[in-house]
Amino acid sequence: MTPVIVTCGLSKWYGNVLGLSDVSLEIEPGITGLLGPNGAGKSTLLKLITGQLRPSLGTVRILNQNVRNNPSLFHRIGFCPEHDSFYEEMTGWIFLTSLLSLQGFSAQEVRARAEEALGIVELWADKDRLIRAYSRGMRQRLKVAQAIAHDPEVIILDEPLSGLDPLGKRKLIRLIKTYREEGKTVLVSSHVLPEIEALTKTIILIHQGKVFAQGDIHSIRDLIETHPHMVSIRCAEPRGLAVQLLEKECVLKVHFGPDGRSLLVETNNRDQFFTTLLARIVQSRMEVDEITSPDDNLQAVFDYLVGK
Amino acid sequence: MTASPPAGIRSFPSSVGRVFSVFFQQGRRARRTRFFWLFSFLPVAVSLVIKFNQIFSERPGREGVYLFSNLIMLFYLQMIILITALFFGTSVCLEEIEGKTLPYLLTRPVAKAAVVVGKYAAYTVIMIGMVSVGLVLSFLFLNLNHLSDPSLYGLLGRYLGVLILGLIAYGAFFTFLGSAFKRAIFIGLLFSFGWENVIQYFPGSSQRLAIAHYLKSFLPTAAPGGRFSFLTFRLEPTAPRLALLVLFGLTAVFLTLACVLFSKKEYVLED
Amino acid sequence: MTIREKGYSHWDGQLLERRFPWTPITRLGIRLAFRKKYFRFIFFGSLVPAVVFLVGFYISERLEDFQFMLQGSRRILEVNPAYFKTYLSSDFLLFMIVMILVVSGAGLISDDLKHNSLQLYFARPLTKAGYLIGKASVVVFFLLLLTLVPALLFIVFKLLFAGDFRFLAAFPWLPLSVIGYSLFLTFFFCAYTLLLSCLSKNRRYVSILIFAIYLFSDILFGFFYETYKKPGFALFSLKANLQQVGAWFFRLKPAYGIPWQWSFLILLALGVSAVFVLNRKIRGVEVVK
């Protein structure tokens, strides 16, 4: 698939402070999660991608065009900023229709698109209230509405789920997922791991201005050879099972749980280990309650990569 | 809904027009605009007071044209349009930066220069509307007894033209200040009530370093001394055509500088 | 057990409440103002008249040495209560005070309204009065440095240069007048600034209001005075009213032929309306209709 967003050696300094360092990315259609703690450089990267900031080094291209000083490209790009800022004296309707007017649509189309967008984010009933009177969640939804109202091909959302209640988050996640089916490119940033995990498996991990990893969560996990995989097994005879497993080369360590019914195995070859484990369980007819991989998730990947 | 690019989105004038439309509507409705309407109408209230006093007083008092030319007009020229242009001019860029609404504009298919020009045009039209109505009403109230005299309207037209030129020129200058400096208000106040006042008392060509000089070159008579000495000066006027050229030239220069700065500068959205 | 090993533990001792809970607000306001270069420029520029007047004190004690310069001007350098009143109510000083308020006073409350900080303030053991006193104290600090401190120093230097207490014996009430008028000026400008600052969340707008209202009131006075030649129009001008009250403080004849009490009442009315408006506007919760 042709990448939609391409950055090459992108770096940004704020005086002596390094905001972003040598970021080279290729983002393809679909949903990509941009994950990192506060101050990692996510917003800086998104602002560079949307041309709001000038790179100190490197280039950014979207849809094979330079972003900086290329306003016509923004007909195909939608951006939801992180700041909770609006033209407070406007109503939600006027805000949205004003921004749609700037897109160059006719009055009729502006109305139609605004109606649709407000309906999608469930703000239609409050469209004539002043933005000043909106709750935090309503304001966030309005921000998303202005990013999607003109039906862009590329949607860049900076912390879109912040301020939303759990139901609101679920609805927005569902909405974002529909864009993947439509073939759009969505880049979503967040510092909340479960949010990103719920949205996509394709992530970019960023920390201290550098990209630590990019790709599928599981693939990234597998690539981290320095950290063994953890497998947790809950069974009736954990010690007996441990004795059998420790004979295998792929098993590095075994820890016993405090409840006396579980063991945590560290292995450097997950596939081989699972083959062995299943064989042993069948052979010994052992009762096993649960087998999980506690570190096969984004949190563990992130913790490993940032060295916590 | 399919995303078909609207016709003519690429042209600069079209972008300016869209920005103008949006910010004219917004500016018209804004609370601050109501305050500046009131502010622009203060001379109208003063004119009404003077007129009522003339009507009910036994003394004839000064002629309306005299009062208008030497007091009301200078009131507008050296206070009302300066304060109004300072606020609206600096707002073109600064309100987006201070309000952190800049990303909404920068991620639209409009050139940054079009944002500056469009907003400047919208706010200038609003200012001209406010000030013109006040000026015309003041003039009419003060000259209530001479409204049938056609020569008065020529005078009114000239005064109106001077104020409009002033708003255009000062608005452009303050737009440039707003794009260049965070504390544009402070610099603008120093310029308007410091530099513009002081430099006009200097002889020779030094007077030409003030925008007010070119505006006053269009005015028919010099103002009297006395209490209003800070409003008066020994004018060595520039020829009207040259003054007009200079004012439009300054407007173009400052607007261009504002556009260039706004396009090139990176604005950090902080408190 | 060392502190490092002890970890967190609840304080067993007595919880002492700060006597003036608003002092951190004042300290922060002053520190933030002095961080701005242009504020320092205006502030120290405002002290130039004080230096000039101080030189005047010196010359007044050495009149013989400056005969060649002073021909016809001896009256200007006569150090008396009018000299002090001239300094404290001079056009330049009042103008610079307004500029200082534009730069450092406009954002005192408007920034808090813009960022919804009032809830943060009132979630602390701080009352509305404490908050307003804290904010007002920032203005009080700067204005007293420009008015009271130089004026008291003038008295000290006059006594030093004269080498005796004859001056104070001639005008024993002068220190009280200096203190009284400085405080009056300061509290008026406090009320004026805070009133305008609470009217809007936009600091630029407030800056313009502070400057425009002061200037406009004076222009309006000049306008009507020039037209009708009636001193009563001085009541329109904030500057003229301040000067009228100053004349009373220093036992001088007011410049405009109207009783100083009217000027005082106008300024007092502004102060009272400031209190009223501030009481309504400063709330922990914003009510949006």
Image (cartoon, coloured by chain):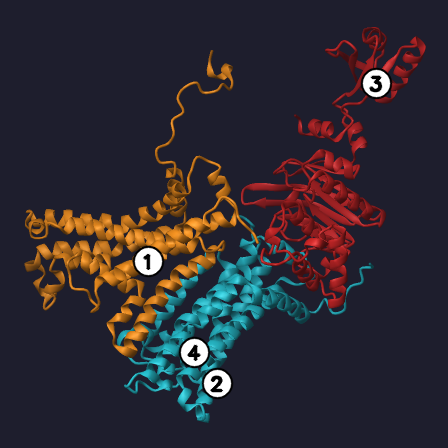
Q: Position of residue B73 (x, y in %)?
A: 40, 78
Q: Chain of mark 3?
A: A
What is the three-letter code of the residue carrying label 2?
Gly
Give me the C-alpha separation between circle 3 and circle 1. Answer: 79 Å
Query: Any idea which chain is the cyan one in this picture?
Result: B
What is the three-letter code of the residue carrying label 1?
Ala
Give me the C-alpha separation between circle 2 and circle 1. Answer: 42 Å
Q: Is residue C103 left or right of residue C230?
A: right
The residue that label 3 is drawn on is: A290
Q: Are marks 4 and 3 on the same chain?
A: no
What is the three-letter code of the residue carrying label 4?
Leu
Q: Are marks 3 and 2 on the same chain?
A: no
Q: Is residue B116 left or right of residue C149?
A: right
Q: Colour of chain A?
A: red
The residue that label 4 is drawn on is: B215
Q: Position of residue C224 (x, y in %)?
A: 31, 75
